[in-house]
Image (cartoon, coloured by chain):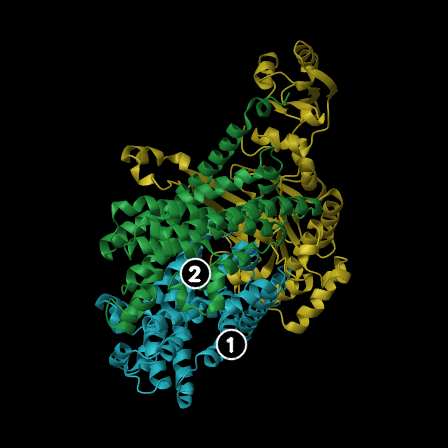
Amino acid sequence: MIKASLDESPLRANFFVVWSEVVKNLKFLMAYPVIFVFWTIFPFFWFLTFIFQGQAIVGGLQSASFAEIAGTPEYIPFIILGAILNGYVLTSLYGVGESIRREAYQGTLDYLLSSPCNKAFILIGKAVSESISSTVYAVIQLIVCIVFFGIELTLGVIMPIILILILMILGLYGIALMLAALSLQFKQAHDLAHTLEYVFYLFSPVRYPVQALPFWAQIIGRFLPLTYALIAVRSLVLLKQNFPAIYEQIFLLFVIDVLAIFLGFYLFNWMEKRTKKSGSISQF
Amino acid sequence: MEIHVFLRQVEDQLLVYNRDNDVYSIQTINLTKVFKKRKHKGIFGFLKKKAEKETSESSKDVTVALDHVNSEIRSGELFGLLGPNGAGKTTLVKCLSTILIPDEGTAIVNGFDIRKQTSLVRASLGLVVGGERTLYWKLTARDNLMYFASLYKMPRREAKDRVDELLALMNLSDRADERLEDYSTGMRQKIAVARALLHDPPILLLDEPTLGLDPTFSRQIRNQIRELCKKEGRTILLATHYMKEADELCDRVAIINDGKIAAIDTPERLKAMVKENELIEVTCHNPPHDTENYLRPLCPDVEIITLIRGDEAKGMPSRIKLIGGNAEKHVGTVVDALRKTNAQITSVNISMPTLEDAFIKITGAKLAEGGAT
Amino acid sequence: MKKIEEETRRLKQISCPSGLSLANLKAELRAIWECNIKEWKIELAYPINFTRQCVEPLIFLLPILVYGLVLLGGSRFSESLMRLVGTGDIVTFTFTGYIIMGFIGTAVWAMGFSIRKEQWYGTLESIYVTPTSRLSLVLGMALHSVVHQSLGTLFEVGVIYAVFGLVLRIEGILPALAIFALMMFALGGFGIFISSLALIFKEGWIISEGFHSVLMILSPVAYPLTVLPTIAQQASTVFPTAPALVGMRSFLIENYTPEILGNVFLHLLVLDAAWILFGILIFYLTDSYVRKTGTLGKY
């Protein structure tokens, strides 16, 4: 008699799946403190080179030419905010995007797929755990930057920043879901993740304002959630604008989220059915 | 166990002789290996109290994988190493192949000391391990073998001829230029055996070579092992937990458990340690809970009572073995006692002892499970 | 003598070159070459990955250049850089530094991760039981990476020259290559050191990534060393990339004034000897350690 699944309400069961996945992934992370320390500390090394480059080229901490495009002469906080938010891109692409391949490599994918739960909630669980760890890294990095690099953060911007981050994460994980779907069929998930990373790196305003790019590159950037998130966060923190000034970015982020999540789930379900039929699902 | 009479240094090789003046290909001298278990403390491990840390560093944190192992393998012998998982078979093979450095003792392989002459030891042996991933799946069989031939320092022309010869021997010439990812598990294992033979080594170390293979491929591999030893005169050390494999192939078998060699002899003599009337096997479904303790008071002179559980879901019965003492006379008592429970007896045998029975009698442990029970 | 021959014949003789003989050296060199070929074959079996790795250096270079141009309002001339090193062309300055980026990757990733990669393939133990030196395997991976990076660099030179234009002294190319070669020897020793660390630590990629990040800061790729804190400038002299870049730019860029005076060639020779000896020493110590602890095949 299959008792458990009949008694449990679907909502509660799905929540439990998400919760279990979150707990499992966070336990993995806690079992590897070196990984935790790495993702907290090493992003600093990656943006320090840009800070030194800026100082060599400009001869100081501010650039009037930079201010004409970015709206602020202070390029160091500009770079730092870009690096911190870019961290979410890395963990979403490499964390969730490769999670399916990791399960296949460990031999647990078959068991996950043959379980009666909705697989999408397993992915949601993975996404939530990655978001939690990314946020912990980001908070630590931000505190260090406030202390050592002079970034000013007032209390009034914290809630809007949290909203922007949530919207950005939703959009990123919609894209990561599409990546996970493709990785079911094409085994080289790492290459797909890298390619997406390059797209974000080149076309989002991580290191420079999006206006610095040629027109065709700016169009590509407009489809990426990181672009709007960065514009919005920098407007609040660096340009000291108020919340209504970023309504456009919030709205566009919301639209991208809906599209990305819908496409992500649809593609994932379609690919899962297709690869189950072909029998290539647990090969790696 | 035969004791070596003397060692003789001839150029850079040590010759190890036994009492009958046979030369030993492999000799282990007090070989010992101890592993310390690593504690994974995790991200909050530094919060562990000091007292807890001190008590955790006890003898339970070390595993004695090899415990002063002394053994000799004659030149041209097919020598079996039989024991359950965790007995120390793989550790011994790794020490002999120089992958692992022992903590105490040493071994002489083809006249070379494993501690001091590692290159020459490696050139003297070929290693085959069970398991899938020991070759490059994205390369063809030929590419794999040619690459390893270069690592065995074979000249290119010689390597090419040898690779062709081995591929023909394994009946894989027509698939030599296909990637290994398209091969079956058995075919990959054949290539692994071919790799071990590339440089024509006098000694082969085989660590569970038929692990995971179906019966057809297992039989092919076993036949090949037999030929390599008998026709080509190679010395072979075969580490396995398959009793039947050791019984069928080996000239002598060493029984190993918990890092110690409990006995070394021919399979016949080992089986003869269990006398016929000393072995009763009762096959039944649904044996009683804690069978050993249930039957023990009824058969006080029987040395070993052991239950080997079958897979009831698949309809495979369990086996209760009584070994030693005068087990034969307790048949009626045991049958009556089992009938009082829910056990359904399917057969009672006063059987010919197998190597497994010898193993159980000598070590007190079961071959199917790891370690002593 | 006859009796000895008879006795040794009972143990089958093996023919395997060993020690300091010419035959052994040839065999080790052949193993290095075959390892390189093996890596090429495996890499080309993943065409998407191969294509991506060819393009990747450009992907990471472009933001560095665009960022610099944005700071100057679109101009490629920086007065500040001119004051520091005698040349204000940020594109040529940055690109001549960036050339070595891929080769830093050779040391920390290709060499540093070589043994790890074999563990991942599952072939490490199979390789370890052969009589070929492990160092030859690491060098084989390094050879593959150097060739790979060299091809990538030529591609980058073509693209950057076409898009931005480069102003280089042609007569400086040969001496710059000599300095580059000296740098590669020291980086090779460094790579051997990294490969031994990656063998001990389970999360070996963190070691490689960590050293890569540190080396990126201490190497004057996109900025002169003088902008670094003093302690970082001193630390940079321990690694070959800093003196090599200073030396290469001296030959390749007109009016370039090295911020570090001194004999670059001598500095690099000392680093070569130091890193090669240090790397080999640590390599053999860790090799012995993992064989003692039994963690060789574990991943």
User: Which chain is represented by yellow in the image?
Assistant: B
> Who's the residue at 49% across and 36% down the image?
A18
Q: Is residue B145 visible?
A: yes
Instruction: Give the SS element for disc 1.
Output: helix
- Which chain does tag 1 point to? C
Read off the residue under disc 2: A204
Taking depth in this image into account, of A263 and C263 the one nearest to the observer is A263
Q: Which mark is residue C155?
A: 1
Chain identity of mark 2: A
Q: Quadrant of residue B195?
A: bottom right
Mark 1 or mark 2, which is nearer to you?
2
Across and down, in percent, residue B171 comes to 77, 58
Do marks 1 and 2 share a chain?
Answer: no
Q: Residues within 10 Å of mark 2 (few under 14, many from 20)?
A: many
* Crowding at mark 1 (Cα within 10 Å: few <14, some 14-19, many 20+): some
Residue B80 screen position, x and y as percent: 63, 44
Three-letter amino acid code of the residue under disc 2: Ser
Asked whether the viewer can see residue A38, the reply is no
Circles 1 and 2 in contact, beta carbons < 8 Å:
no
- Answer with left or right where residue A63 lies relative to residue A231: left
State the hue of chain C: cyan
Residue appearing at x 36%, y 61% in the figure:
A46
Give the residue displayed 53% in from the left and 46% down from the top.
A261
**Where residue B86 sits in the image (x, y, percent)?**
54, 39
Q: Quadrant of the N terminus of chain C?
A: bottom right
Q: Which residue type carries mark 1? A: Phe
Q: Quadrant of residue A86?
A: bottom left
What colour denotes chain A?
green
